[in-house]
């Protein structure tokens, strides 16, 4: 039986990202106070699935910014605003 997600979640785009986060948490001996969840929508992963499935309580979101950092951040901000969730502004944009 899979573990029940914790109230605070770190959402990642894919399974590889989840393994990277687990390895970092293990390396730095972080306590298990949050779950690392792969966003999936209709059997697919990635930014679209992550944005479509934002839960009520989240700790953070990990997304790849291989191409356009500003566009990726704007997509995340737009989705959060649509769902009436506040978004921090780490990029200063």
Image (tube, rainbow, N blue to C red):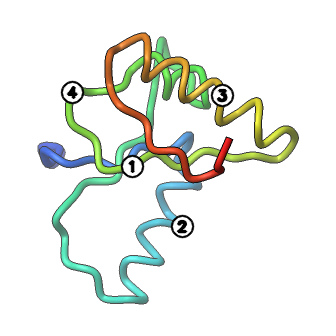
Asked whether disc 1 touches disc 3, contact meaning CB atoms under 8 Å apart, the reply is no
Of pointers 3 and 2, the one earlier in the residue sequence:
2
Query: Real-space Cα distance between discs 4 and 2?
Result: 24 Å
Q: Where residue 46 appears, x then y in whole percent? A: 61, 31
Seen at 56% across and 55% down, the residue is 17
SS of the residue under disc 3: helix
Q: Where residue 10 appears, x then y in whole percent? A: 36, 50
Q: Where residue 29 appears, x then y in whole percent? A: 30, 88
The residue mark sitting in front, 4 or 3, is 3
Residue on which disc 3 sits: 74
Residue on which disc 1 sits: 60
Instruction: Reply above or below: 54 against 36.
Output: above
Front residue of this view, candidates 56 and 12: 56
For disc 2, the neighbor class at 10 Å (few under 14, some 14 to 19, many from 20) is few
Query: Real-space Cα distance between discs 3 and 2?
Result: 24 Å
- Left or right: where 25 falls relative to 43: left
For disc 3, the neighbor class at 10 Å (few under 14, some 14 to 19, many from 20) is few
Asked whether disc 3 touches disc 2, contact meaning CB atoms under 8 Å apart, the reply is no
The residue mark sitting in front, 1 or 3, is 3
Q: Quadrant of residue 54?
A: top left
């Amino acid at each position: 039986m899979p573990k029940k997600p914790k109230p605070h979640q770190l959402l990642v785009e894919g399974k590889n990202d989840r393994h990277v986060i687990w390895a970092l948490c293990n390396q730095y001996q972080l306590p298990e106070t949050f779950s690392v969840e792969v966003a999936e929508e209709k059997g697919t992963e990635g930014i679209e699935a992550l944005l479509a499935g934002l839960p009520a309580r989240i700790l953070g979101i990990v997304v790849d910014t291989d191409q356009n950092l500003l566009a990726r951040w704007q997509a995340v901000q737009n989705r959060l605003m649509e769902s009436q969730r506040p978004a921090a502004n780490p990029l200063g944009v």
